[in-house]
Image (tube, rainbow, N blue to C red):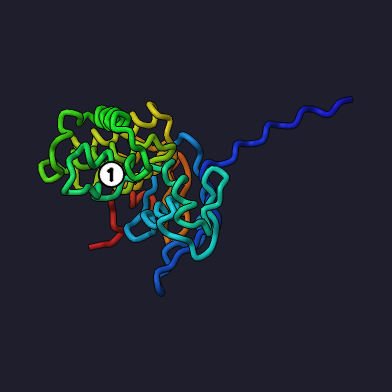
Amino acid sequence: MPAPPSAEPAASPFIQIRGLHKSFDSQKVLQGIDLDISRGETLVLVGPSGEGKSVLLKHIIGLLHPDAGSIQFDGTSLCGLSERQLAPLRRRIGYLFQNAALFDSLTVAQNVAFPLIEAGIKNPAEIKSRVQEALEVVELDAHKEKMPINLSGGMRKRVGIARAIVGRPEIILYDEPTAGLDPIVTDVIDHLIKRLQKRYHVTSVVITHDIASVFKIADRIVMLKNGIVYFNGSPDQLRHSPDTFIQDFIAGRSGMTS
């Protein structure tokens, strides 16, 4: 009797992190992170401040190097790569910094064009077309000649997102995309993150402390605590977790008694 056909092998993770450790002087920040990120998902990183969420993002893009452990991006190990070797991998990643990190001396359009110029694209027509497309996606094409100083906080974040997507990345890393924004603008950013996932099929990794945003945008939620993955599951699993710490975190309770 012939043997039954073997099961299809599971697809390898888009990003695979194993045993990741990082310290700054005597402060241990990451203490053994194990995490897989699948292609096309929106993964939201949550947890108390100072638990290493931004540090983890900076490892994924190669801005920081681990003390121990490994990171693989689409099958390529990032550990030990030079800046020149990292460059083509970074072009596949869009990064939204916490404060958008716009250049105050450049217009909106020039800010968005900057990654294309850095990547060596020289055709002015191509740059103009791609900048216009990115600004239309974030609904800011009418503001392309403005300077950053003349933009609201929400508009600055949207320009930062346009700059993150102009290179047509496969993954976008968002570091606190709604920090300091009012609830209406926060909702706009949340919808934009979901729209980008559907339009471009990008993988998204989002750091946020806004619990309402977490449940709006996440396919999967990972909580960091004490330098390790404390929770890894769906929004429903987080919402119904019996863990007291998780429930206090969701409700914004300190756990202190008066």
Q: Residue at x 36, y 54 (%)?
A: 54
Residue at the far left: name it: 150
Q: Residue at x 54, y 60 (%)?
A: 69
Q: Which residue is mark 1?
A: 177
Residue 12 as seen in the image, left or right of residue 180: right
Residue at the far right: name it: 1
Total count of labels: 1
- Residue 12 in the image: above or below residue 3: below
- Residue 84 in the image: above or below residue 183: below
Q: Secondary structure at mark 1?
A: loop
Q: Residue at x 40, y 54 (%)?
A: 58
Q: Quadrant of the N terminus?
A: top right
- Name the spot of residue 165 as percent of width and height, x first: 34, 36
- Residue 25 in the image: above or below residue 245: below
Q: Residue at x 33, y 39 (%)?
A: 116
Residue 10 as seen in the image, left or right of residue 139: right
- Judging depth in this view, the residue of 93 and 225 nearest the camera is 93
Q: Quadrant of the C terminus?
A: bottom left
- Judging depth in this view, the residue of 95 and 127 nearest the camera is 127
- Name the spot of residue 193 as percent of width and height, x first: 33, 35
Residue 121 as seen in the image, left or right of residue 77: left
- Judging depth in this view, the residue of 183 and 118 nearest the camera is 118
- Name the spot of residue 216 as percent of width and height, x first: 33, 35
Bin the neighbour count of mark 1 within 10 Å (Cα to Cα): few under 14, some 14-19, many 20 and up. Answer: many
- Residue 170 figure quarter: top left
Residue 41 shows in the view:
yes
Residue at the far bottom: name it: 26
- Name the spot of residue 110 as percent of width and height, x first: 22, 40
Residue 242 shows in the view:
no
- Judging depth in this view, the residue of 82 and 159 nearest the camera is 82
> Identity of the amino acid at label 1?
Pro
